[in-house]
Image: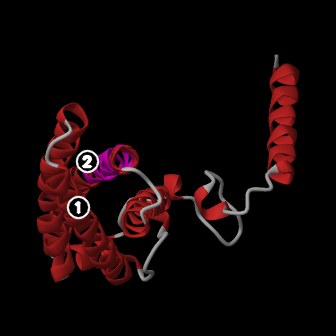
Amino acid sequence: MRLTLGNKESQNGLFEKIIERADFCPWPATSGRITRHHQSPQSRPLYTPEERVRRDTTKWTLVQGILAPLQFVIFAVSLYLVLQYLQTGEGLAWAHASIVLKTMALYTIMITGAIWEKVVFGRYLFAPSFFWEDVFSMLVLALHTAYLLALASGLLSADGLMYLALAAYVTYVINAGQFIIKLRAARLQSAKDAPASELSGAVMGAAE
């Protein structure tokens, strides 16, 4: 039995070495593995204690908290106007105006979000904790920008523009879902860290 366990441990060690050598992912910090110089976001908390303090004290957290629901309200109204046009053929101007307004709101939250990320994590985009959210945000931004370019150049018909807007809105909903999941993870982390902080404070108080 001991020999069998020893063989299994040796095989597991060899297997891990093979995986490490075969892993050619160009983004080691976000690929789910740990290297000598990078740590994967899965193995680090969403916020370090220092990052949490910066998050809680910067004004840009409040700005994001205001802009996110505001953008969603604009999105909901715009979605209704777009679907109404596609169904009835009426209200095209209102639909266009709402999509442009939604795009402007997106640009605003992207710029302020990058500033927030710089303050909290030290980089404007692609911080490990929000790497894939930022990557998908680029797709959202690209589709919204494509709509503006198509509208200005007349490359698409009215229906084509509406369907392009719907594609942009689908990616927006997915991206919003990503950030909601991260928000929930942050709350769970805070709830988990709170008892530990209280216990540490109690121990320090008792020691004094």
Q: Mark 2 points at which residue?
A: 184
Tally the numbered discs: 2
163 sits to left or right of 92: right
* Three-letter code, disc 2: Arg
Q: Residue 102 carries which label?
A: 1
Q: Residue 53, position in %: x, y?
A: 24, 76
Q: Which residue is drawn at 32% across and 83% down?
A: 119
63 vs 70, nearest the viewer: 70
The reply to whether discs 1 and 2 touch (Cβ–Cβ < 8 Å) is no
Q: Could you say which quadrant of the image residue 150 lies in?
A: bottom left
Which region of the structure is painted magenta?
Answer: 168-185
Main SS category, magenta section: helix
Give the SS element for disc 2.
Answer: helix
Q: Residue 65, position in %: x, y?
A: 15, 65
Asked if residue 177 lies in the magenta stretch, the reply is yes
Give the SS element for disc 1.
Answer: helix
Q: Residue 161, position in %: x, y?
A: 37, 51
The C terminus - image quarter: bottom left
Asked if residue 93 lies in the magenta stretch, the reply is no
The N terminus - image quarter: top right
Q: Residue at x 65, y 58 (%)?
A: 34
Vertical arrangement, residue 135 with respect to residue 49, above or below: above
Q: Residue at x 34, y 51 (%)?
A: 172
* Three-letter code, disc 1: Lys
Q: Which of marks 1 and 2 is nearer the N terminus?
A: 1
Q: Residue at x 71, y 68 (%)?
A: 36
